[in-house]
Each structure stands twice: as C-alpha cells, then as structure tokens.
Amino acid sequence: MKKQYTASFKAQVVLELLKEEKSIAEISSEYGVHATQLRRWKDEVIKNLPDLFTDKRKSSEAARAAQEKKTNELYSEIGRLTTQLNWLKKKSGINTDKD
C-alpha cells in the first residue's frame, strides 16, 4: 500500500532539508522516506517558492476581469441568438404567443 504523507509532515521534512544541517540520507532514515521522494519534495518547494510572494490581489483581479469579459461575451451571444430566433419565427410564421 502506498504511503501518504500530510502537507505539514512534508513541510517539516523539506524545511529540514533546506537547513542543510543533515544529509539527505540521514533525513531519509530519520523520517522513513526514500531519498528520491525527498528530492522531489525539495524540488517542488524550490520551484513553487516564488509563488508565495506574488500579489494575490493582482491575480484575483485579473481572474475577475477575465470572468466578467467572458460573461459579457456570453450575454451578447444570447442576445444575438434570441434576435435570430425571433426573426426566424416571424419569417416562418410560427406563433409562439401563449395568449
């Protein structure tokens, strides 16, 4: 069965790796995690470290603006399709009034 580690455990182990007070082999035997897995965790942390310092407000504003643009495009498309549908109904003589 595959071992699963909590995020806090991984963070603790990687923090110890980054301190470089012990070798990977020592940390591996101490925590019972294979050295290859430790290297993967460390590489992932180093790769994603710059994202911790990005301004979340800017990225959320950009996402919100993109969502608003998409919504406006969809409403425009709905308007065009409704107009086309009404025109086609008039042209074909279909009466959709439910009076």
Image: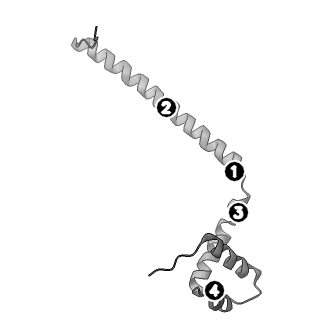
Which residue in the structure is indicated by mark 4? 31
Quarter assignment of residue 81: top left
Of helix, strand and loop, which one carries label 3? helix
Task: Classify mark 1: residues with Cα within 10 Å, few (<14), some (14-19) or many (20+).
Answer: few
First reached walking from the N terminus: tag 3 or tag 4: 4
What whole-number distance in Å separates the C-alpha atoms at marks 3 and 4? 27 Å
Q: Earlier in the sequence, mark 2 or mark 3?
A: 3
The amino acid type found where label 3 is placed reads Pro
- The residue that label 1 is drawn on is 56
Q: What percent of the width, then of the height, locates residue 91? A: 25, 12
**Disc 4 and disc 1 in contact, CB within 8 angstroms:** no
Furthest-top residue in view?
A: 99
Image coordinates of residue 5 in percent, x first then y, are 57, 75
Query: Marks 1/2: CA distance?
Result: 26 Å
Residue 86 higher or lower than 29, as above or below: above
The type of residue carrying mark 2 is Glu
Cα gap from disc 3 to disc 1, whole angstroms: 12 Å
- 34 sits to left or right of 93: right
Instruction: Give the x, y percent position of residue 17.
Output: 70, 81
Mark 4 or mark 1, earlier in chain: 4
Q: Amino acid at mark 1?
A: Lys
Q: Secondary structure at mark 2?
A: helix
Question: Observer-nearest residue: 14 or 31?
Answer: 31
Instruction: Name the disc covering residue 67, or none.
Output: none
Give neighbour class at mark 2: few <14, some 14-19, many 20+ (Cα, 10 Å): few
Q: Residue at x 63, y 91 (%)?
A: 29
Give the mark toward the camera: 3 or 4: 4
Image quarter of the N terminus: bottom left
Q: Disc 2 vs disc 3: Cβ atoms closer than 8 Å?
A: no
Residue at image mark 3: 50
